[in-house]
Amino acid sequence: MPLLIKTPAVIASAGNKPKEIREYIGRMNSKTDDVSIARMKSPGGWAEPGQQPEFDEYTLVLHGMLRVKTKDGCLDVHEGQAVIVHSGEWVQYSTPEPEGAEYVAVCLPAFRPETVHRDKD
């Protein structure tokens, strides 16, 4: 039987400014362990601590630009583009442009706070 997701769960964000995270599918909203799908809205100037997650993250930018910094360099992912960050790879996300960004993040397996492994401040 299909499961209709009527509304997302709002999840607290990390970073220097508030960011809107709405999980549609995942551990919090649908009790799904295999995958999480969330819509993010980040303000201009937002940045989060670096992390080394235990999940693959697939991100599609809907509006604006998402900066993806890794140990190998920096990618600016613009509207209509996507990026894949693999499990175990250090990454830091930010939205440095004034208009911020809106994007969809898909995590395999599903996002869990204890598997993100954020850098200590």
Image (cartoon, rainbow, N blue to C red):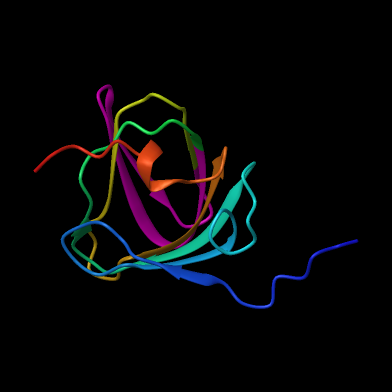
Q: Main secondary structure of the magenta part?
A: strand
Count of numbered tags: 0
Which of these two is toward me, 105 or 14? 14
The residue under the point 48% across, 33% down is 55
* Horizontal relation, residue 100 to residue 86: left or right: left
* Horizontal relation, residue 41 to residue 67: left or right: right
* Residue 50 horizontal/vertical position (percent): 23, 39
**Against 100, is 74 above or below?**
above
The residue under the point 57% across, 37% down is 109
Location of residue 51 by image quarter: top left
The quadrant of the image that shows the C terminus is top left
State which region is magenta. Answer: 57-82
* Horizontal relation, residue 91 to residue 58: left or right: left
Which of these two is toward me, 1 or 63? 1
The quadrant of the image that shows the N terminus is bottom right
Give the residue at the far right of this rendering.
1
* Residue 8 horizontal/vertical position (percent): 57, 72
**Against 67, is 23 above or below?**
below
Is 46 in the magenta? no
**Against 48, is 23 above or below?**
below
* Residue 111 horizontal/vertical position (percent): 48, 46
The residue under the point 70% across, 70% down is 5
The residue under the point 56% across, 54% down is 27
